Image (cartoon, rainbow, N blue to C red):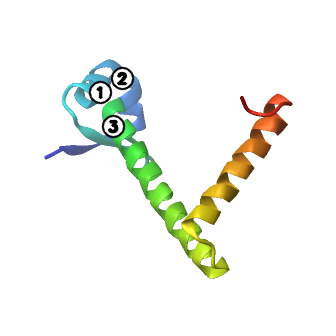
Amino acid sequence: MTRQATITASDLQRASGSVLKRVAVGGEHLVIERGGYPVAVLLSYQEYESLMRERALANHRELVIALSQEAERQGLTEEQLLAELEDVKRQIFEETYGRRPP
């Protein structure tokens, strides 16, 4: 289990090297407080990447559900939806590169 601790912003300034080591090597999560209020969290880059990946997947799932519902509302088949997607991709390519896709 990941350990969580609290540190003040001034303590972070004074001991940044050891604090970074606690987070990067020790896997600790640090809540940084200023004036007694939490203002930020420090965690390893690996954990940050994992959180961003989870967020992207959740956003993707929401988008897929919304697209599916809209396609169903419009009565589109999967083939029609894919054909429209290919048409939009072609239009974007032409707008971006000024020519038709190869």
- Residue 18, given in percent of the width and then of the height, sits at 27, 21
Look at label 1 and name its amino acid: Val
Q: Residue at x 22, y 34 (%)?
A: 27
Q: Which residue is nearer to you in this view: 94 or 61? A: 94
For disc 2, the marked residue is: 16
For disc 1, the marked residue is: 19
Look at label 3 and name its amino acid: Leu
Q: Residue at x 29, y 27 (%)?
A: 19
Quarter residue 45 falls in: top left
Residues packed near mark 1 inside 10 Å, few (<14), some (14 to 19) or many (20 plus): some
Q: Is residue 95 left or right of residue 80?
A: right
- Residue 64, given in percent of the width and then of the height, sits at 51, 62
Q: Is residue 21 left or right of residue 50?
A: left
Q: Residue at x 56, y 75 (%)?
A: 69
- Residue 68, given in percent of the width and then of the height, sits at 54, 70
Q: Could you tell me if the residues under marks 2 and 1 are in contact, i.e. CB atoms within 8 Å?
A: yes
Residues packed near mark 3 inside 10 Å, few (<14), some (14 to 19) or many (20 plus): some
**What kind of element bears circle 2?**
helix
Q: Is residue 18 above or below residue 59?
A: above
| Residues at marks 2 and 1, CA–CA distance in whole angstroms | 5 Å
Q: Is residue 71 left or right of residue 102?
A: left
Quarter residue 44 falls in: top left
Q: Is residue 23 left or right of residue 40?
A: left
Tell me the number on the disc at residue 43: 3
